[in-house]
Image (spheres, grey):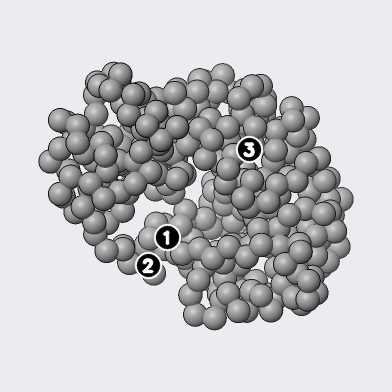
Amino acid sequence: MSRLGHREVLSIRRTRGASVLLFITDRCPVGCAHCSVDSRPDSPRITDHALFASIVDQLAALPELRMVGISGGEPFVERRALALAVTRLAAADKHVVLYTSGFWARSDHAPQWIHRVLEQSAAVYLSTDAHHVASQGPERFRNAARIIARHGLPIVVQAIDEGDTLDRTRESLAAALGPDWADHAELVPTHGLPHGRGAGLYAQPVRHSGRSFGPCDVVDAAVVRYDGRVTACCNESVIMGAGPAALRRDCADGSDVAAAVTDFTNDPFFTALGSVGPGPLTGLPGFSDLADRQFSSICGLCWTMTKRRSAGESDRMLAAIATLNS
């Protein structure tokens, strides 16, 4: 099984239609105060396993799809579904990238089903920060790092850059993997998101004019939820049902999911958002009044544009604009 570092993952993710994120569950046992999707130990999880298997099989059959990220919630709470998804996607030569808190690593010896999942994966994004440590202590993170490293898997550690979190994370990595931990893991600082429970902890950033926003770095990969919901991007609020309806589709089976993924990939408006960004689109007649309007995030501008847009309107112009950065 091939391995992917953070740079390779980002490159595939920014190649339009080459990846999707499979949101496998809403549930997470950690219960962090800053969770951007409001995941809880009793949140919804998979109930229709036949639908989920159909979704996975249809994704596996998409020829242009090279990588599938699997997240949640915490994907390792879904033993049956996670094992099925990783096995079938890997068999179809898709790179599987896992996103986890490592809560499952109660010791540095994991159950065999977890080893089988790791063996078939291309990389693991392992998250930690003060909220994770407060919920489950530092040792599970260290155990998870050891277990993943034994499989020769690249570890990308995502940690919110606040307080002394990054220094403590480096100390944990050194304790887990030794002084040469950087040979096995990359530390990627992140920031807290003002979504879900995080809305109570993180303020919206400074507002900027609509014309100033560049390309969106998350709209090139659709998100597929375990219940058949497909969204144009990984905005947590959109996944949970907020925002314009045009940003998501609720599908009844795997074939509908595959069609929705393809439609979002080929949509000229979303393609242009990923290529040049919404800022240049404020030069179009239907959006010109947004050029000087202030927005706290690129998502706010996108939502406003999406609500205004009529299906098929200016698609040829948008398609041409989308090629400018290709």
Residue depicted at x 15% and y 37%: 288
Crowdedness of circle 2 by 10 Å Cα count: few (<14), some, many (20+)? some
- Among numbered discs 2 and 3, the one appearing first in the sequence: 3
- Among numbered discs 2 and 1, the one appearing first in the sequence: 1
x, y percent for residue 213:
30, 48
Residue depicted at x 82% and y 54%: 152
Secondary structure of residue under mark 3:
strand
Q: Verify CB contact (< 8 Å) between mark 2 and mark 1.
A: yes
**Splitting the image into 4 quarters, where does residue 204 fall?**
bottom left
Residue 180 relative to residue 200: left or right: right
Vertical side of 228 occupied by 30: above or below: below
Residue indicated by mark 3: 68
**Splitting the image into 4 quarters, where does residue 41 fall?**
bottom right
Q: Is residue 198 visible?
A: yes
Vertical side of 214 occupied by 253: above or below: above
Q: Is residue 20 visible?
A: no
Q: Mark 3 belongs to which amino acid?
A: Val
Crowdedness of circle 1 by 10 Å Cα count: few (<14), some, many (20+)? many
Vertical side of 120 occupied by 196: above or below: below
Q: Quadrant of the N terminus?
A: top right
Q: Who is closer to the viewer here, 180 or 28?
A: 180
Q: CA distance from mark 2 to mark 1?
A: 6 Å
Crowdedness of circle 3 by 10 Å Cα count: few (<14), some, many (20+)? many
Q: Nearer the viewer, mark 2 or mark 3?
A: 3
Secondary structure of residue under mark 1:
loop
Q: Who is closer to the viewer here, 208 or 247?
A: 208
Vertical side of 178 occupied by 64: above or below: above
Q: CA distance from mark 1 to mark 3?
A: 23 Å
Residue indicated by mark 2: 202
x, y percent for residue 208:
24, 56
As drawn, the label of residue 193 is 1
x, y percent for residue 134:
58, 76
